[in-house]
Image (tube, grey):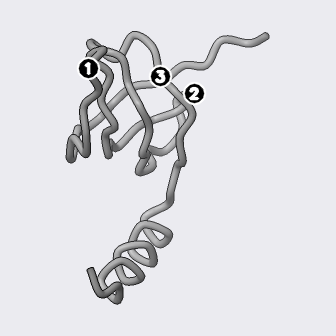
Amino acid sequence: MAEIKFEVKETIATLSESTKGWSKELNLVSWNDREPKYDIRDWAPEHEKMGKGITLSREELKALRDALNRLDL
């Protein structure tokens, strides 16, 4: 399996933290030297490991923001 190269360009928000030290974060991440995208996933401390997540373009992030703003929470 090919190694996945990534670089966290900006940490935007920590959404939650587990008792084992992992945190769910919204970051701007460059995957395999590509243009950075917005990314929500679980990360181990120091970002040495990651869980499954979702990667969003700027337009997709805006659509998600708009949808969340319409929720009555």
Kind of residue at badge 1: Thr
Q: Nearer the viewer, residue 61 or 36?
A: 61
Give yes or no for contact between labels 3 and 2 (Cβ–Cβ under 8 Å): no
Callout 3: SS: strand
In primary-sequence order, the first of circles 2 and 1 is: 1
Quadrant location of the N terminus? top right
Q: Quadrant of residue 70?
A: bottom left
Q: Quadrant of residue 30?
A: top left
Vertical order, 33 against 26 (above or below): above
> Which residue is labeled 3 in the image?
50
In primary-sequence order, the first of circles 1 and 3 is: 1
| Image spot of residue 62 (x, y percent) | 39, 74
Vertical order, 64 against 33 (above or below): below
Q: CA distance from mark 3 to mark 2?
A: 15 Å
> Which residue is labeled 2 in the image?
32
Left or right position of 55 against 24? right
Vertical order, 60 against 54 (above or below): below
Q: CA distance from mark 1 to mark 3?
A: 16 Å
**Labelled disc at residue 45:** none
Kind of residue at badge 2: Asn
The number of numbered discs placed on residues in the rendered structure image is 3
Disc 1 crowd rating (10 Å Cα; few below 14, some 14-19, many 20+) is: few
Q: Nearer the viewer, residue 15 or 40?
A: 15
> Which residue is labeled 1 in the image?
19
Kind of residue at badge 3: Met
| Image spot of residue 65 (x, y percent) | 35, 74
In primary-sequence order, the first of circles 3 and 2 is: 2
Left or right position of 31 against 40? right
